[in-house]
């Protein structure tokens, strides 16, 4: 065997970084979820008093940005939002230089959302402060997978014996990649469902415990958790499948949902497109926990920030 | 010792083991070089002429000078990445006595003037430089360049490397004109209509990393089409650059078989080259977004690498070429999708060939030497090179196939450091490189 490839930067990401779920151990995941259950956004705990949390967003975001900001503030931290537009990024500053600049102004942790897969890894390898991935291209969105897991736990008590189904555009989805890693690590088998353009065969190689079906009825039968993904019309444009075909074959309707377990929950990372991946009846129905997910975003991200800055106790 | 028989500019390489596949020699031999040519090849201590310089090659392999059919030396226009002088110094250190430069510079080498500029002694090249010129104006893929004028200026082939010649009609005309002039058309086989925004090979690793992948079919489809076109054009010459997939090899085999018509008449000549990184690494080596594993064509699957190893051994592959593609650090230390494609390769090629192909996969040294010398010389018809027959150019590569060493990118002679092989332990090292009878590189 030949020596491993030499890493480009000798630095490892700083302790407390959260770059993805893929390389996390189940016990870390469960520990973070436990911590999140103790976090209460309404009762402020100044765990991170005077800590500086920089939110570096290269991409639009409502939920993730606001909940990271509120999570940081609930813990007493000072937050600073940097958007790619209106910053030196527009003038051509590189990601590494931007990271170095933010470190120099005193950032204690950087939360980054970026359209390029791996951008958080690049910045984390070159900085001595923790970096939290708030979504990188099509790669991972670890805080979303964690808050979804928290939502499942709150409704199902435990992961034991559960089965999950993910329907939609898995290929383009960082939410799906993180969810697949997380759920299979905690012992929940996952069925992926969608047309080959959205769920290519290679998707099953992502993690052990994944299977693929093209039939939504088969995917739903007996499942406990239904995770729907947004279907972007512009992405359907280049594909062989037409919008009306997708709706006919994969849209979550009340009738289809009946195939799942009676107490199955319906999740969606948002934003939802009513009439495309799901009907209003399902979105607003009794099994929908979509608003719970958003709500759980704040305590989950409080736990992630507390862990990042070594204040997890 | 009195040296009254010696003449100026003579060098005797003594005591080495000569491997010259084109001459079918694999034996201890002394080689006498004089006035830029091979004067004598004789059994040990049997050369008749004297020499004013001697090189002790005991325990070493003496081979025809290595020829790299595919390098990017970045001049004109991008001398912050590499220059002819630094790139050829790296070539010399890697045992290459001749390099063929790709035309995708700034500006593109699409005129006889730029071809002459590249060959001008002012460029201070340490080894022979053979320019490959652009096949279409500005490598825009639309109108052919003046092949005849480029050839007269010293270009040895044409290509739009970095990009494919996509249009069927343009490719057909290029092959047809190439056939008239005995001028190889070198294809960068990539159907760019299906590889937009892609940064690595399409497979489990690209899916895991959330990166758009180039399918193997995007390469094979172009090679397949080109072979079909070449077969319709008598005496056309198609050379597939940096071939990386199993399916593209199938198309090349089809071209080689059908190239020979009934009897001895050759219809077309289809050749191909493979890079050291494609016979060494896999797509999964991208790991966590290592941009030093980002190149085009990308690192491929284990199946593809297996097929390449078979083709290197069985003769389907004509040459090992480096696709030496230097880039500045700031062009690699960026988001993976934004990082420049390509790695340096001149100084690690032989070491990878010996370490991986010879020691690990048991490909004989004679075949490896062929892939670096006689093979590439045939692909571009480099007359009087690729073999140390008497009268040929005195280009010689001397190496130690057993020497263990560790490659340090920081000590590279290239201006750039973008290599995935920094810190790799190797077996097999170049000891000296001789160009035109002069030693241009020697290990310290």
Image: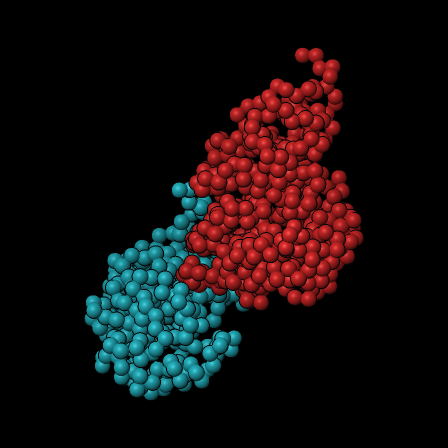
**Residue at image location 20% in from the left, 67% down from the top:** A160
Relative to residue A242, is residue B236 drawn left or right? Answer: right
Q: Residue furthest front?
A: B263
Percent x, y of residue B340: 56, 55
**Residue at image location 32% in from the left, 68% down from the top:** A211
Front position in the image: B153 or A294:
B153
Q: Is residue A159 visible?
A: yes
Front position in the image: B323 or B79:
B323
Residue B422 vertical position relative to residue A254 in the rendered view, above or below? above
Percent x, y of residue B278: 51, 50
The picture quadrant where one finds residue A32 is bottom left
Relative to residue A83, is residue B113 drawn left or right? Answer: right
The picture quadrant where one finds residue B191 is bottom right
Relative to residue A271, is residue B308 drawn left or right? Answer: right
Front position in the image: B417 or B320:
B320
Percent x, y of residue B162: 62, 56
Image quadrant containing the C terminus of chain B: top right
Display colour for chain B: red
Front position in the image: B224 or A110:
B224
The picture quadrant where one finds residue B48 is top right
Residue A213 vertical position relative to residue B141 in the rendered view, above or below? below
Percent x, y of residue A70: 37, 69
Image quadrant containing the N terminus of chain B: top right
Q: Is residue B103 visible?
A: no
**Residue at image location 40% in from the left, 64% down from the top:** A202
Q: Which chain is cyan?
A: A
């Amino acid at each position: 065997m030949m020596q491993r490839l030499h890493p480009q930067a000798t630095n490892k990401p700083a302790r407390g970084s959260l770059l993805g779920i893929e390389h996390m151990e189940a016990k870390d995941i469960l520990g973070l979820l436990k911590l999140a259950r103790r976090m209460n956004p309404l009762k402020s705990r100044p765990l991170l008093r005077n800590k500086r949390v920089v939110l570096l967003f290269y991409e639009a975001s409502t939920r993730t940005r606001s909940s990271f900001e509120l999570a940081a503030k609930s813990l007493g931290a000072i937050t600073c939002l940097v958007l790619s537009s209106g910053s030196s990024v527009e003038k051509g500053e590189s990601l590494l230089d931007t990271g170095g600049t933010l470190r120099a102004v005193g950032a204690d942790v950087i939360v980054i959302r970026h359209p390029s897969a791996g951008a958080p890894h690049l910045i984390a390898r070159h900085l001595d402060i923790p970096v939290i991935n708030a979504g990188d291209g099509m790669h991972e969105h670890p805080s979303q997978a964690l808050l979804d897991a928290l939502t499942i736990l709150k409704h199902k008590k435990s992961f034991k014996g559960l089965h999950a189904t993910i329907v939609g555009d898995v290929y383009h989805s960082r939410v799906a990649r993180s969810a697949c890693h997380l759920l299979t690590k905690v012992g929940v088998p996952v069925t992926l469902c969608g047309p080959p353009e959205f769920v290519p065969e290679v998707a099953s190689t992502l993690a052990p415990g994944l299977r693929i079906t093209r039939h939504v009825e088969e995917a739903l039968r007996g499942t406990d958790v239904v995770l729907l993904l947004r279907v972007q019309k512009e992405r359907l444009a280049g594909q062989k499948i037409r919008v009306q075909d997708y709706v006919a074959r994969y849209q979550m309707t009340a009738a289809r949902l009946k195939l799942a377990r009676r107490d199955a929950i319906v999740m969606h990372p948002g934003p939802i497109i009513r009439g495309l991946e799901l009907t209003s009846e399902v979105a607003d129905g009794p099994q929908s926990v979509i608003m719970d997910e958003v709500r759980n975003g704040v305590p989950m991200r409080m736990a992630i920030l507390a862990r990042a800055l070594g204040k997890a106790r | 010792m009195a040296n009254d028989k010696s003449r100026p500019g003579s060098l005797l390489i003594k005591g080495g083991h000569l491997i010259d596949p084109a001459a079918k020699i694999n034996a201890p031999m002394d080689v006498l070089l004089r006035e830029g040519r091979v004067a004598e090849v004789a059994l040990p201590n049997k050369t008749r002429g004297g020499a004013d310089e001697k090189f002790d090659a005991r325990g070493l392999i003496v081979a025809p000078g290595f020829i790299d059919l595919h390098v990017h030396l970045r001049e004109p226009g991008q001398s912050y990445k590499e220059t002819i002088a630094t790139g050829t110094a790296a070539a010399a250190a890697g045992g290459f006595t001749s390099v063929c430069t790709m035309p995708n510079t700034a500006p593109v080498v699409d005129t006889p003037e730029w071809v002459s500029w590249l060959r001008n002694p002012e460029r201070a090249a340490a080894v022979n430089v053979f320019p490959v010129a652009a096949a279409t104006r500005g490598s825009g893929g639309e109108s052919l360049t003046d092949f005849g004028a480029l050839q007269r200026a010293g270009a040895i082939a044409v290509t739009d490397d970095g990009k494919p010649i996509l249009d069927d009609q343009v490719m057909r005309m290029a092959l047809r004109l190439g056939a008239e002039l005995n001028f190889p058309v070198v294809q960068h086989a990539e159907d760019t209509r299906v590889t937009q925004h892609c940064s690595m090979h399409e497979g489990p690793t690209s899916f895991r990393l959330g990166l758009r992948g180039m399918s193997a079919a995007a390469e094979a489809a172009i090679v397949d089409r080109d072979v079909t076109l070449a077969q319709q054009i008598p005496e056309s010459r198609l050379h597939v650059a940096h071939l990386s997939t199993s399916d593209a090899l199938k198309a090349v085999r089809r071209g080689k078989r059908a190239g020979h018509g009934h009897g001895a008449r050759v219809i077309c000549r289809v050749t191909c080259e493979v890079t050291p990184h494609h016979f060494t690494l896999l797509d999964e080596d991208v790991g966590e977004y290592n941009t030093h594993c980002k190149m085009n064509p990308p690192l491929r699957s284990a199946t593809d690498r297996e097929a390449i190893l078979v083709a290197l051994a069985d003769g389907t592959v004509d040459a090992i070429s480096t696709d030496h593609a230097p880039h500045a650090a700031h062009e690699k230390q960026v988001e993976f999708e934004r990082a420049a494609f390509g790695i340096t390769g001149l100084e690690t090629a032989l070491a990878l060939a010996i370490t991986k192909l010879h020691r690990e996969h048991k490909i004989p040294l004679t075949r490896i030497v062929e892939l670096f010398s006689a093979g590439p010389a045939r692909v571009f018809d480099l007359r009087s090179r690729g073999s140390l027959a008497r009268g040929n150019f005195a280009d010689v590569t001397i190496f130690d196939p057993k020497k263990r060493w560790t490659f340090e990118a920081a000590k590279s002679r290239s201006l750039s450091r973008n290599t995935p092989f920094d810190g790799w332990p190797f077996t097999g090292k170049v000891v000296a490189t001789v160009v035109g009878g002069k030693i241009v590189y020697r290990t310290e």
